[in-house]
Amino acid sequence: MPEKFDVIVVGAGPAGASCAYTCAKNGLNVLLIERGEFPGAKNVMGGILYRKQMEEIIPDFWKEAPLERPVVEQRFWFLDKESMVTTSYKGLEWGKEPFNNFTVLRAKFDKWFAQKAVEQGATLINETVVTECLVDEDGKVIGVRTDRPDGDVYADVVVLCDGVNSLLAKKLGFHKEWKPDEVALTVMEVMKLPKKTINERFNVNDDQGVSVEIFGDATQGALGTAFLYTNKDSINIGVGTTLSSMIKKKMKPYKLLEYVKEHPMIQPYIEGAESLEYLAHLIPEGGYKAIPKLVGDGVIVAGDAAQLVNAIHREGSNMAMSSGRMAAETIMKAKELGDFSERVLDSYRTDLYDSFIGKDLKKYKDAAHTFEAYPQYFEQYVPLMNKAMNTMFTVDGTPKWDKQKKIMQSFTAGRGKLGVAKDLYRAWRVVK
Ligand code: FAD
């Protein structure tokens, strides 16, 4: 191992692998350090990986990457106790090149992705924890300390892709402990089910997948979602809410997942499935306002470590990959200049804010906080939607005008017309 690398990337998730791959492909000498037994060993994701941002790093990756199914249908379920209102989009074009997104199992995908970086010349070391950044007397990051004997390694620049907790950026003073409303706690299970059964239950063929996002009773009214994603011969089922909601509602995550699995609208989809894996992980959901300091002298922060998740659209892996790639591109420019100061590396920050990442996070900057502060959206309106559908579509001889009136009254009963109008306006304002 050389004494000094051009770049040290900490963490071989999507952000780290993208950064290491892009740097190595462009001739930089890269060390990728992963604490897991192998990349992906400890990583958790519901499972939707986006084609566009991955393709910008490895064109046509779908021809060789270990993917599960291309998603052809996105369903949304608004759940009550014994009913649900649903909406979906199914497009067969998503099942063909160039595809839209894929279900993946991260243990397989991350391993493959990191290996691609190695093929480009990056050095990968597993089972190694970076305990802190090495900082010189001028405050410049000059390397990392690992838990290996003689474990100090040096580089021109260190890229922190160490995931949501991001202890390393915290130690550098880039952010404080995340607040409970800035992270969501999610638990999930991978459940084995024969391919044929999955196809029948979700109305797809072998080469088509479905993603289902579930709101309302799945989180017992808390801000969050449950999900069902189809792999080749397994299903990912999970549920998560902000930590603050869990604390407020005194919910236990594993109990919530049991509740979801036993819900009469969901249980038939997993009937007979065998549990393969049980996983729990935090998701950074602080959004735009929680993005920490992103660059310093000799250091860049990317992916979950930088709070880059769009919780409204369930996009995190793509932001991780794009931010990793942008970090690499900035480093290449810095290498040309021979200057790894914060001033030069700052172009990463501006690139990020100018990209879909900055723009999308800005668009939804108030959404999560608003939906958490006004719990009626999940607690009251979802059940009301279900009751409205029941009222409208139950054929009981009541004239439809009377039904409509009854539905309107049910919506305004607790909150009044003005209250409902305010709720609608508030929701529109934060997602417009
Ligand atoms: P991570 O994937 O967390 O990778 C960080 C890596 O760093 C890990 O390999 C870890 O072992 C390593 N590491 C950490 N600390 C150290 C250290 N000190 N030393 C060495 N190595 C270290 N996003 C989507 O796009 N689609 C989805 O469907 C989706 N569903 C999700 C469902 C769940 C349950 C969860 C938890 C997240 C989901 N996300 C989803 C978000 C997505 O998983 C993350 O945004 C993405 O994984 C972030 O990538 P990353 O590389 O920044 O971090």
Image: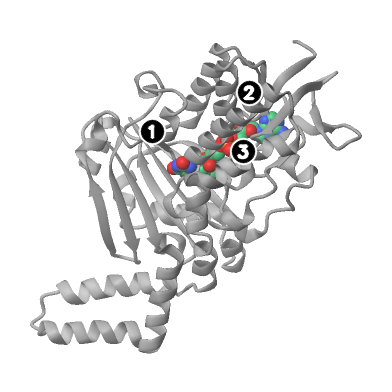
3 or 1: mark nearer the eye:
3
List x then y, in percent, for residue 167.
Answer: 73, 42
Tag on residue 51?
1
Three-letter residue code for mark 3:
Tyr
Q: Which residue is mark 3?
A: 348
Tell me which numbered mark, 3 or 1, is placed earlier along the sequence: 1
Residue depicted at 74% across the width and 53% down the height: 176
Q: Which residue is mark 2?
A: 37
Residue placed at 56% from the left, 26% from the top?
A: 17
Residue 188 in view: no
Residues 211 and 302: in front is 302
Q: Is residue 126 above or below residue 366?
A: above
Tell me the quadrant of the picture where the C terminus can be found.
Answer: bottom left
Callout 2 crowding tier (Cα within 10 Å): few <14, some 14–19, many ≥20 = few
Say above or below: 4 vs 402.
above
Name the element at disc 2: loop
x then y, percent, for residue 71: 31, 38
Horizontally, residue 323 falls left or right of residue 411, namely: right
CA gap between label 2 and label 1 equals 27 Å
Which mark is in front, 2 or 1? 1
The residue under label 2 is which amino acid type?
A: Glu
Residue 74 in sight from this viewpoint? yes
Q: As displayed, is residue 35 above or below residue 251?
A: above
